């Protein structure tokens, strides 16, 4: 499992006092208020304040005192240490934990490896297979179990074939 988890990306400076507007990757922008420190481009910043608004948040970071300093952070990912992340609710997983998982049918047949997960109303998993990339929606009945410790996702092969492209 990765030590750093990306939680947002900087969109632009906000105002003249160094605040940045970010697009959050977590379920709720309010969750950003839980982080006391973040990492951007390998540098650690203390979080001074967070305002949440829909899928965006506005962060004030120690050491980012003006618009020019905030501009230097544009388009950079914001990460936090895994130990600073709350445990996900039962049946929910961090994308970082799903990436690299082997996808197998309940019969044991290997179907591929997860290379990305696109968050959506129904998340879209993309696998690399010997025949190329395959994407599937995590619709009802497709995923039977997830074992992040053993990096394995078991799917119902019939449902998988119905929703994969």
Image (cartoon, rainbow, N blue to C red):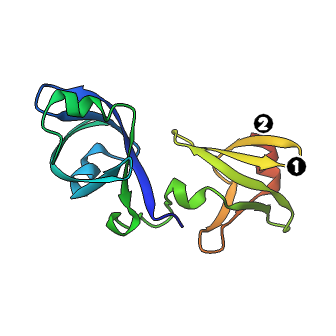
Instruction: Determine which residue is flagged by label 2.
Output: 165
Tell me: 77 left or right of 138: left
Tell me: 150 left or right of 24: right
Where is residue 119? Give x, y as percent: 52, 42
Q: In the rendered structure, which disc, 2 or 1, sits on the residue that comes first in sequence?
A: 1
Q: Is residue 92 above or below residue 77?
A: below
Where is residue 20? Give x, y as percent: 23, 34
Residue furthest to the bottom in view is 149
| Residue at point 38%, 52% (across, down) | 42
The image quadrant where one finds the N terminus is bottom right
Quadrant for residue 76, please give it. Answer: top left
Compare residues 9 and 111 and report the one nearer the observer.
9
Instruction: Determine which residue is flagged by label 1.
Output: 130
Where is residue 123? Give x, y as percent: 57, 44
Q: Are marks 2 and 1 in contact (CB under 8 Å)?
A: no
How packed mark 2 is, by other alpha carbons closer than 10 Å (few <14, some 14-19, many 20 or more), is few
Badge 1 marks a residue whose secondary structure is loop
Tell me: 19 left or right of 98: left
Mark yes or no: residue 69 visible. Answer: yes
| Residue at point 77%, 49% (across, down) | 159
Q: Is residue 56 above or below residue 27?
A: above
Badge 2 marks a residue whose secondary structure is loop
| Residue at point 46%, 67% (across, down) | 90
């Amino acid at each position: 499992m990765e030590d750093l988890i990306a939680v947002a990306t900087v969109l632009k400076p906000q105002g003249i006092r160094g605040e940045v507007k970010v697009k959050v990757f977590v379920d709720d922008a309010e969750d950003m208020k839980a982080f006391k420190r973040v990492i951007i481009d390998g540098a650690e910043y203390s979080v001074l304040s967070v305002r949440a608004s829909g899928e965006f948040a506005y962060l004030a970071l120690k050491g980012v005192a003006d618009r020019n300093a905030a501009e230097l952070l544009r388009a950079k990912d914001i990460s936090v240490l895994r130990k600073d992340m709350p445990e996900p609710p039962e049946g929910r997983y961090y994308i970082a934990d799903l990436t690299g998982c082997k996808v197998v049918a309940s019969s044991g047949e290997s179907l591929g490896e997860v290379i990305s997960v696109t968050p959506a109303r129904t998340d879209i998993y993309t696998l690399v297979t010997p025949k190329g990339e395959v994407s599937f929606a995590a619709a009802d009945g497709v995923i039977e179990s997830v074992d992040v410790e053993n990096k394995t996702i078991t799917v119902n092969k019939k449902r998988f074939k119905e929703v994969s492209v």
